[in-house]
Amino acid sequence: MKSTGLKMSNLTALVLAALLSAGCIPLAIEAGKKAWEDRSTEDQVTDGKIYGGILSRLSDKDKNLLLDVSADVWEGRVLLTGTLDSRKAHREVVSLVRRDKRIRKLYDEVRIVTKAEKERRRKLTRGPEGQKGQRGRRRG
């Protein structure tokens, strides 16, 4: 079982300090995230593959699903959130997500709403210029 405590070695702290003093802020931020990460690199890669597969399957079904449903993946556990306008669409999305056998647990928090509410949320997601915002994301 993995330790959930947060630990950072002196070497990691030294590397972070060197990166910050050299003006490498983005690199220092990523190094800091990795230092505090409680998932193994292998888990992070697997989560990324799960997430990518989910996005691909949803996009193949209907690109608009990427506006309606978000997925977060952590150590093989998937949290689905968002809104759909029918139980049938909801069943299809859950079925598409469950195709990946690496998923240990699926937390389904997708809500069924009216078509009007779904369209209102899509417009909000797209932003003022009608461009797609950032909905789905992979933790890590």
Image (cartoon, rainbow, N blue to C red):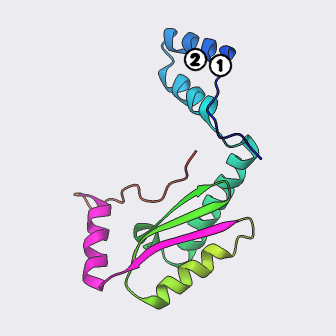
Q: Toward the viewer: 17 or 125?
A: 17
Q: Position of residue 52 (x, y in %)?
A: 62, 59
Q: Residues within 10 Å of mark 2 (few under 14, many from 20)?
A: many
* 3D distance between C-alphas at marks 1 and 2: 6 Å
**Residue 115's spot in the image, x, y percent?**
30, 84
Residue depicted at 64% across the width and 27% down the height: 7
Determine whether label 1 and label 2 are within 8 Å by CB. Answer: yes
Q: Residue 99 vs residue 54: left or right?
A: right
Quadrant housing residue 79: bottom right
Look at the image and say whether residue 105 sits in the magenta stretch: yes
Q: Secondary structure at mark 2?
A: helix
Is 5 drawn above or below residue 17 in the view shown?
A: below
| Local SS, label 1 | helix
Q: Tell me which corner region of the image, top left, top right, bottom left or bottom right, holds residue 47.
A: bottom right
Three-letter residue code for mark 2 = Leu
Which amino acid type is marked by label 1?
A: Thr
Asked whether 23 or 1 is in front, the reply is 1
Q: Which residues are magenta?
A: 104-127
Q: Which residue is mark 1?
A: 12
Q: Residue 137, relative to residue 36: is it above or below?
A: below
In the image, is 96 to the left or to the right of 63?
right
Q: Residue at x 65, y 19 (%)?
A: 12
| Residue farthest toward the left in the current orientation of the protein | 128
Residue in the image at 49% along x and 83% along y? 90
Q: On residue 16, which mark appears?
A: 2
In the visual, does 128 lie left or right of 35? left
